[in-house]
């Protein structure tokens, strides 16, 4: 089961703002019911600010209201909740100091080993750059 983002802070918010049972909150946040009860008593997570799962699209208010009315129902993480946004693969930034490293290396190989064919030189680069360096 996927857990919400920042489960303890989410549990703090659910305890403070809803009438859900400790078991419902514990199962949603992946905690033990006694730990949730300790949070409610103020023994654990005293300095943690609550994290609103409704505002962050992890739960809906309708789902909370429905579960408050029936203690047998369980909260489920919303399908819209995507806590980890992956960076798309693409061109990465090359520092200015390293931008000439590859052309300098190609020029060195061509100067030191003139007998190498162009196919042997262009491994890891484009053919036009080795031709331009020659």
Image (tube, rainbow, N blue to C red):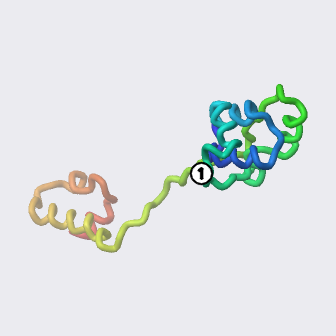
Along the viewing direction, whichever of 49 and 104 lies nearer the viewer: 49
Q: Is residue 73 left or right of residue 33?
A: right
In this view, 6 is above or below 77? below
Q: Secondary structure at mark 1?
A: loop
Q: Residue at x 15, y 55 (%)?
A: 116
Point out residue 1 in the picture as x, y percentages from the top left corner: 64, 31
Q: Which residue occupies 72% across, 39% down?
A: 77
Q: Is residue 5 above or below residue 22?
A: below
Q: Tell whether 31 sits left or right of 53.
A: left
Depth check, front residue: 32 or 97 = 32
Q: Which residue is mark 1?
A: 85
**Residue 101 coordinates in the image, percent (x, y):** 25, 67
Which of the image's four quarters has the C terminus? bottom left
| Residue 110 point in image, percent of width and height | 15, 63
The extreme bottom residue here reads 96
Q: Is residue 85 visible?
A: yes
Residue 4 in percent (x, y) is at: 66, 42
With 64 as the anchor, is 48 left or right in this view?
Answer: left
Up-down: is 65 above or below 17? above
Question: Which residue is nearer to you in this view: 86 or 64?
Answer: 64
């Amino acid at each position: 089961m996927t857990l919400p983002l920042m489960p303890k802070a989410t549990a703090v918010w659910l305890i403070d703002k809803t009438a859900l049972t400790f078991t419902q909150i514990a199962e949603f946040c992946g905690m033990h019911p006694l730990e949730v009860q300790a949070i409610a008593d103020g023994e654990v997570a005293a300095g943690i600010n609550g994290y609103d799962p409704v505002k962050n699209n992890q739960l809906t208010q309708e789902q909370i209201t429905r579960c408050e009315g029936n203690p047998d129902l369980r909260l489920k993480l919303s399908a819209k909740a995507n806590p980890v946004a992956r960076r798309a693969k693409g061109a990465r930034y090359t520092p200015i100091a390293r931008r000439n490293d590859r052309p300098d290396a190609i020029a060195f190989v061509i100067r030191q080993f003139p007998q190498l064919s162009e196919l042997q030189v262009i491994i890891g680069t484009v053919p036009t750059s080795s031709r331009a360096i020659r």
